[in-house]
Amino acid sequence: MAVGVEIISIGNELLIGKTLNTNAHWLAKRITSLGLKVNRITVVGDDVKQIAESLKEAINRNPQFILTTGGLGPTFDDKTFEGIAEAFKCEVKVDPRASKMVREKYIEYAQEMDCGKFELTPARMKMATIPEGAEPLSNPVGTAPGISIRRRELAVFALPGVPSEMKAIFEESLLPMLKAAAGTLTYFEMSLFVSGIMESEIAPFIDNVMHDNPHIYIKSHPLGAERKPKVELHLSTTAKSVETAKKRVGRALIQLTEIVEAKGGTARMSGKNL
């Protein structure tokens, strides 16, 4: 069974439609590619109670990992650490390790801009004020550290909302841990592009193929108009080895192709080579 992961995206800008949630898209794709399963993506505003409630609800669903993005910066509406602290019933305090990370970044910025001394203002120290018991995660390309909190079998990670910073911390600090949790699990996907048959005509046969191949998930995506039907059939599976995953998808692809051709349509494969 795939390891369960939940993503909580934080920010009013996501809820009002100003910012596209590319972080959740990137994380979901990256996590899935490792063989882990994203069970839910939640979006909440910059509100301590919303963040805390969404985190507690996620914890009650027993995932192995919860990732949050956004709300780690120096401004008044960056409230993720406070929300996490409320969910775990702890305080937020200046962490010496996080403070050192922030200080070193501003020293680096001051040297690059040749602007002399810098001051660790309250706004800057806010980024080093993290929930008790959390471990700061170094930010290779930005200022605000991420954090990790462990509670028994659960690991919670808070990542910045700036995409480049989120990705950098993920790859440096989270990736080894997630790979270890996935073990030999492998995700594999292929697409079959079908022309000449409407999605509604293919639908019953998708059910049949999934019944015959219980480890395969097939999702249809209409690409054309009803009068000129084109459909992408996306097949995916998670298995304990690459060979098993490829065999599963291969069997289902052959079955689907035979059905499409029997109905007078054409099918073209695309994706990783079998």
Image (spheres, helix red, strand yellow):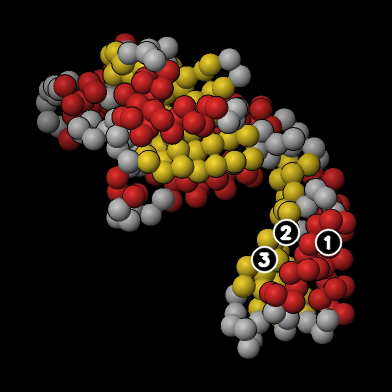
Residue 159, percent from left and from top: 41, 33
Provide the secondary structure element on which disc 1 rests: helix
Q: Are marks 2 and 1 in contact (CB under 8 Å)?
A: yes
Residue found at x 77% / y 65%: 206
Residue found at x 66% / y 28%: 181
Against 150, residue 248 (above or below) is below
Q: Residue furthest bottom?
A: 227
Q: CA distance from mark 2 to mark 1?
A: 9 Å
Residue 60, percent from left and from top: 55, 27
Residue 157, percent from left and from top: 47, 28
Provide the secondary structure element on which disc 3 rests: strand
Against 37, residue 208 (above or below) is below
Q: Quadrant of residue 45?
A: top left
Q: Tell me the kind of residue under disc 2.
A: Ile
Query: Left of 81 or right of it: where is 113?
Result: left
Q: Quadrant of residue 128?
A: top left
In the rendered image, which residue does mark 2 sit on? 218
Q: Quadrant of residue 211?
A: bottom right
Q: Tell me the kind of residue under disc 3.
A: Ser
Q: Of the residues under marks 2 and 1, which one precedes in the sequence?
A: 1
Q: Can residue 223 be seen in this snapshot?
A: yes
Q: Are marks 2 and 3 in contact (CB under 8 Å)?
A: yes
Q: Of the residues under marks 1 and 3, which one precedes in the sequence?
A: 1
In the rendered image, which residue does mark 3 sit on? 220
User: Label 3 crowding class (10 Å Cα cut-off): few <14, some 14-19, many 20+?
Assistant: some
